[in-house]
Amino acid sequence: MPHILPNFATTSLLGLLALALSLLFTRAALAILPKLGFLDKPDFKRHIHTVAVPRGGGIGFILAFSTVTFLYFFTSHKVDDDSRRIFLNHMMPLAILVPLGLLDDRLTLKARTKFLFQILAAILAWHRGLRLEDLFAWPLPTWLGAILTVFWIVGLINAFNMIDGIDGLASGVGFISATCLGLVAFCRGEVALAIFLTCLGGSLLGFLRFNWHPAKLFMGDTGSMALGYLLAVSGLTIKENLLSVASIGIPLLACGIPVLDICLAVWRRIFYRPRPTRPPRTTPASRPAGDTSATLELDSYQEIPIPDNEWFPPPDPQTENDCFLKRAMHILQRLGTADQRHLHHRLLRHFHNNWKRTIWQIYLLAAFMGVAAIACSIIPGQNLLLAIVLILGTFSYILNRLTVSMFWSSPQALNLDFHTARTGLLLSYFFHPLLDLSCIVVGYLLAAKNQPLSLHDGLRFVFIVEAVLLLSRNYRTFWNFAISDDFFNLALALVIGFVLARLSEYVFPIQQHITKLHTSAGGIATSAILIERLFLHYYKNRKSSPLHAQGDSQAKKVTRTVIFGITPLLRLYRDTLYAPSRKAPTEVITGLIAKDPRFLHGYCCGVKVMGTVKDLENIYQKHPFQKLVLIKEPSPQEWDLLLPFAKAHAITLTRFHAEELPVDLPTTGE
């Protein structure tokens, strides 16, 4: 404890100094930036503020942070040369990002230009030694580590850029992330890194004074890109210094809200078609007198109603028949398209433009993820299962909390789009290969437990199993139209893959034999993959379920139908009745009438057998229905009971059958 107190006092004083300088520099920026043309004017497309606000204010907290950290690292006798070198490595890429942000805030650069310079800054950081060298205690090849490092840094830069959408959001979440990472570093005895992060947190807190609602200035790309970069490299440093399989969870969870937001944004922009351009929104000054239906304005924010078809509008006829390459390029171009469907936008709508509830909800979720990040730092060194459970459990909880704001249109959208060829292609060529690969990797990781499995051997096993899946027809199967044979073929391919992986040990012996490695990994991966495919099968049939349709019938007036006979036509009739193309079914299947009484109280194709023709009167008294469909020919005795019953209760009688008809080809004259 005696050696902790001086470090804590020094760290706190430097954080307070950064806060004071940030207040000073940000106030100066507030006076200078508007004169230089750094103004963010509302365009009513993505911005939700209604008046011009100075932007580029992030230069204030960057100057404060840089001043304090440079003074400490180059004047304190407690800092050694190695720490100074690491500090300079952290700061050098800012020489690219800060001018880039200033130019963008002044001139509004193209997204591809910013992306290129962000990649250059990330490559410079990797070259200076800020690298991701292992994943869950597995050492990574240099080339793979470089790719993941650049991906992490560029991703977090853009993540903080995306969440900088309402007053105090990026700076507040950045302060929480820096505080959590700083606590982890301080508890691990990494005083230099703790001071680095404390100064960053203090400078953000000073900037937040001017960015709090109603904001006097915005940090702009100048601040958001620098903030995302500094937290990204700090997370890498903590991860590499902490010898634990859970260390990867520390930066992921500490910056969890921006990470979730950018992941959902990428998902949304790739998989969801953009809706047609909406007409310009009206402002109070341009509304006709007495018109209150356009928008609701509260505290300089505008509530933007989202129509039901915003997520999945009709396909664009101009691009529907394009080749795969053109459509892929079109999808990639959408990644740089700004929208108003980010986490903070949807929460703001959900809370009816209540800025205070929105911002504190996000702060609380960010703090919760920060606590989980701190918990990752104290997980025992090689407890892989606990690390995975903590990381996935935390993200699952946050996603569940955000379901109301992020996914309220998803069920309807997926119902409309699930049975299309486009969805089948996305599942087969993109989603399932990545999911299967992840399941196989996790299966081997869990099967190995604490026993050493070299990266070379692990990659070989994963490659063999995935190669078998690629060579089989499983990735040419449209799983939104799968049958039982497809599930059997998938399970068979997985079994063959893991058997071949086991046999490969006889050709390329592993360094240390692990008991039941392939059996355990195969069981875990096969179970996870089949459960996911079965879930798709369940989801496909959910709209065809009589129970689901009965739930819909409570809200709308529909015809209740009873079916006579149990034949394969029952499934055809049910699938036709509840086809996804029929958005509002006009009928609901109440039950079945069987010819054989031994079917009584059983279920066929998900529909309950309610009795025989002799029980029609009792069935009608308990479950009134308006239509009786014959899919099997009644006997003369059954006709004698059916016809009087139908006349007495005004029941509509119909017959359903399927037949093959020849096509008469038109004859062409000579």
Image (cartoon, rainbow, N blue to C red):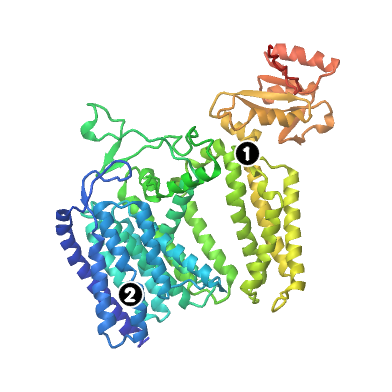
Task: Tell which tag, 2 or 1, sits nearer the viewer.
Answer: 2
Name the residue furthest front: 670
**In terms of image quadrants, where is residue 588?**
top right
Q: CA distance from mark 2 to mark 1?
A: 53 Å
The x, y position of residue 350, in whole percent, is 39, 44
Residue sitting at 22 percent across and 67 percent down?
A: 22
**Callout 2: helix, strand or loop?**
helix
Which numbered circle lies on residue 196?
2
For badge 1, the amino acid type reads Arg
For badge 2, the amino acid type reads Phe
Q: Is residue 414 left or right of residue 227?
A: right
The one of 197 and 312 positioned closer to us in this rendering? 312
Q: Is residue 350 left or right of residue 433?
A: left
* The N terminus lies in quadrant: bottom left
Q: Is residue 37 left or right of residue 203?
A: left
Residue sitting at 34 percent across and 39 percent down?
A: 304
Does residue 299 appear anywhere in the picture?
no
The x, y position of residue 435, in whole percent, is 60, 55
Which numbered circle lies on residue 542?
1
**Callout 1: helix, strand or loop?**
helix
Q: Earlier in the sequence, mark 2 or mark 1?
A: 2
